[in-house]
Image: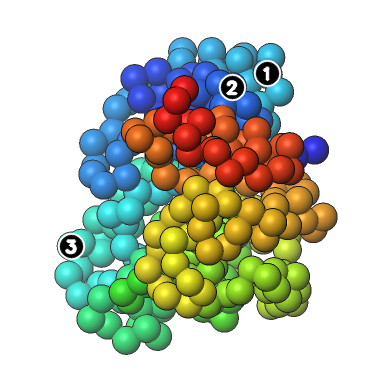
Amino acid sequence: MLIIGSHVSFGKNQLLGCVEETIKYGGNVFMFYTGAPQNTFRSKIDNNLAIEAYKLMNNNNILFDKVICHAPYIINLANNLDPSRYQFSMNFLRSEIDRCISLGVKYLVLHPGSAVKLDREIAIDNIINALNLVLKKEDEIMILLETMAGKGTEIGINLNELKYIIDNINLEEKIGVCIDTCHLNDSGVDLNYFDDYLNNFESLIGLDKLKCVHINDSKNEVGMKKDRHANIGFGTIGFENILKVIYHEKLKNVPKILETPYVDDKPPYKHEIKMIKNKTFNPNLLEDIIKE
């Protein structure tokens, strides 16, 4: 079974709104932020809305055990030059973990962080230190470190960096990986040879750690380190290469999450999911979205 969905909005109806949006797009899984990714404002979790969401998921074959939450961008565990900001990042991550646990969500995607003015080795050790301080043995959650494009001083741009982090986490069973097709392309991974990448992942980290795939085309050539998402089939990766990732036998139980750009302020996900399910590229996709 294809496990596919998109980023959806955790608005006034919270988890219930996420489910309703997912059904509209034809997905059976989804990813959400528990609040705006650029700030700290968070509304109180409404348990009644969550209960209604669970019922709706059950009635519409939404796979709640595969639902993904994404941590906010303002968390940076890699840089500790300002101890107060470093502590803020740890505290905010902890609060996001607690919100996920209260909702029953098992996976939280995290950008590892940026070194800024620090050496990469020190920045990586800061990430390890922070995760070891934040994670608790009783947490029923897995933090998924996202593969990054290499923009600026981002950490997590290759498998060796991710492996080193994972290997040094005390509660290693609570750490996994989320790969992003645009980020892989922009960091220098040619998805024409995705099998080679996946084989390397399997030998270095283990496919049991790969729990989510962000599906995005890229506006950039391989290795440009810019992180600019494109709609499916309208970038440099191409429809067939993206389809190979989505339908790869080794990833059949891993949720695929679309994070592609809105078109004329309209979400593209219903059209892109339909195109992916049909396995046929629609060259008029962008026009169809605008016309809707």
Mark 2 and mark 1 in contact? Answer it, CB < 8 Å. yes
Residue 233 in picture, x, y percent from top left = 58, 52
**217 or 44, which is in the foreground?**
217
Residue 123 visible in the shown view: yes
For the residues labelled 2 and 1, the Cα–Cα distance comes to 7 Å
Q: Identify the element where label 2 is drawn.
A: helix
Q: Mark 2 points at which residue?
A: 23
Sequence-first tag of 2 and 3? 2
How crowded pointer 2 is (Cα within 10 Å; few <14, some 14-19, many 20+) is rated as many
For the residues labelled 2 and 3, the Cα–Cα distance comes to 42 Å
Disc 3 residue type? Ser
Q: In which quarter of the image is residue 171?
A: bottom right
Disc 2 residue type? Ile
Q: Identify the element where label 3 is drawn.
A: helix
Residue 216 in the image: above or below residue 283: below
**29 or 47, which is in the foreground?**
29
Residue 104 in the image: above or below residue 68: above
Residue in view at x 40 percent, y 59 percent: 228
Residue in view at x 40 percent, y 39 percent: 262
Mark 2 and mark 3 in contact? Answer it, CB < 8 Å. no
How crowded pointer 1 is (Cα within 10 Å; few <14, some 14-19, many 20+) is rated as some
Residue 63 in the image: above or below residue 213: above
Q: Name the residue under label 1.
A: 60
Q: Mark 3 points at which residue?
A: 84
**292 or 35, which is in the foreground?**
292
Disc 1 residue type? Asn
Residue 92 in picture, x, y percent from top left = 31, 49
Residue 254 in picture, x, y percent from top left = 70, 49
